[in-house]
Image (spheres, rainbow, N blue to C red):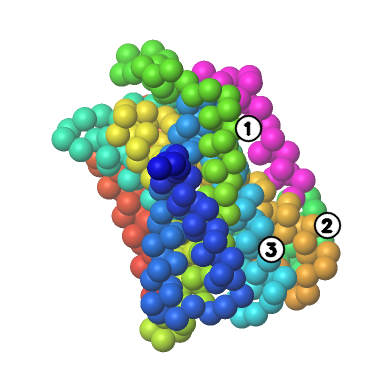
Amino acid sequence: MLRLPAIPWTTAAPLLAVMALVLAWGREPSIPAALVLGVFLAAAVLAAVHHAEVVAHRVGEPFGSLVLAVAVTVIEVGLIVSLMVSGGEGTASLARDTVFAAVMITCNGIVGLSLMVRTVGGRVAVFNAEGTGGALATVATLATVSLVLPTFTTSTPGPVFSPVQLAFAAVASIALYGVFVVTQTVRHRHYFLPITAEGVVVGAGEHAAPPTTRAALLSLGMLLVSLVAVVGLAKTESPAVEAAVTAAGLPHSVVGVVIALLVLLPETLAAVRAARRDRVQISLNLALGSAMASIGLTIPTIAVASLWLEGPLLLGLGATHMVLLALTVAVGILTVVPGRATMLQSGVHLVLLACFLFLAVSP
């Protein structure tokens, strides 16, 4: 009897998830269907993490972290634009709400969770302060220019940029993100590599042979398929989430927070797995790189899309969110400067995330 070769679950899961996405696209799933789609979503997330690690092992750090962060963000930006084009309630502030949620989830949730995983049992998390500090400074600048300044500009009423101001913010964002990528991957790459407690740079996968080029390319393709499935299924699940939010009497912005949590699952799991292997620097690269890409790629895309989008584009944060952003930056600086962290720092970041989530539900 002819036996067909077994297909690995990491290949089957993304393909099945995409098939489920095709069948469910454009429909509002029932509760049982939403639960089934949730299972496919979780499988696609796990597959994405696996393939991201294969690619990272082949290209090395910090390129591996960059691949996952940019891939997720590019697809996330496409999701934001498609939702804004379709119109509907809350689309005027969708970009702002999604980007700010991504910043809070990455800079507090992923950072705090990664530090907690590493510091359990009294251990100390060690990372490179020079590279992480530069990344945090870039995130803080991008967030301030794109999300804080619109609240205080006077050319147009409301928390919006004028067309010229939006164009400037877009150019500044993409330029600053480009400078960071060059610094991270070319000029000062060693600042973004994992280090030991003595400050010695270590490899991300020094005990195993790297995968072949063919295997890495296959994983890159399956990574993209997995991420398309993750973001697409998150969008498909959004009507059920929105209905639940409305039934509970919660603010509409909670929908954006839930979708951001789903979309960022691959990076969260990848960061936690890196922290377990004592590669906290990789976890921080993923967290801050995702926040940076979310702003640096979303704002220029939205600026171009605004040429045909109707209605206002609300970018400026309210007072409560500006306080949370300022506190996140201040706490991030105090965490990064020593180059090492304990469970106390992880707890502070996780409490900040809890504050954001609680105030999103109860503003």
Q: In this view, does 50 lie above or below 362?
A: above
Disc 3, SS: helix
Q: Which of marks 2 and 1 is nearer the N terminus?
A: 2
The image shows residue 143 at horizontal and vertical percentages of 59, 50
Quickly name the residue at label 1: 180
Q: Which of marks 3 and 2 is nearer the N terminus?
A: 3
- Give the magenta-colored segment's residue range: 170-191
Q: Could you classify mark 1 by the number of other residues whose Cα lies within 10 Å: few (under 14), some (14-19), or many (20 or more)?
A: some
Residue 354 shows in this picture: yes
Residue type at mark 3 is Val
Residue 150 located left or right of residue 228? right
Q: Residue 147 carries which label?
A: none
Q: Say which quadrant the C terminus sits in.
A: bottom left
Q: Distance between the residues labelled 1 and 3?
A: 25 Å
The answer to whether residue 172 is magenta is yes
**Residue placed most toward the observer, 232 or 264:** 232
Quickly name the residue at label 2: 164
The image shows residue 75 at horizontal and vertical percentages of 62, 53
Name the residue furthest left. 121
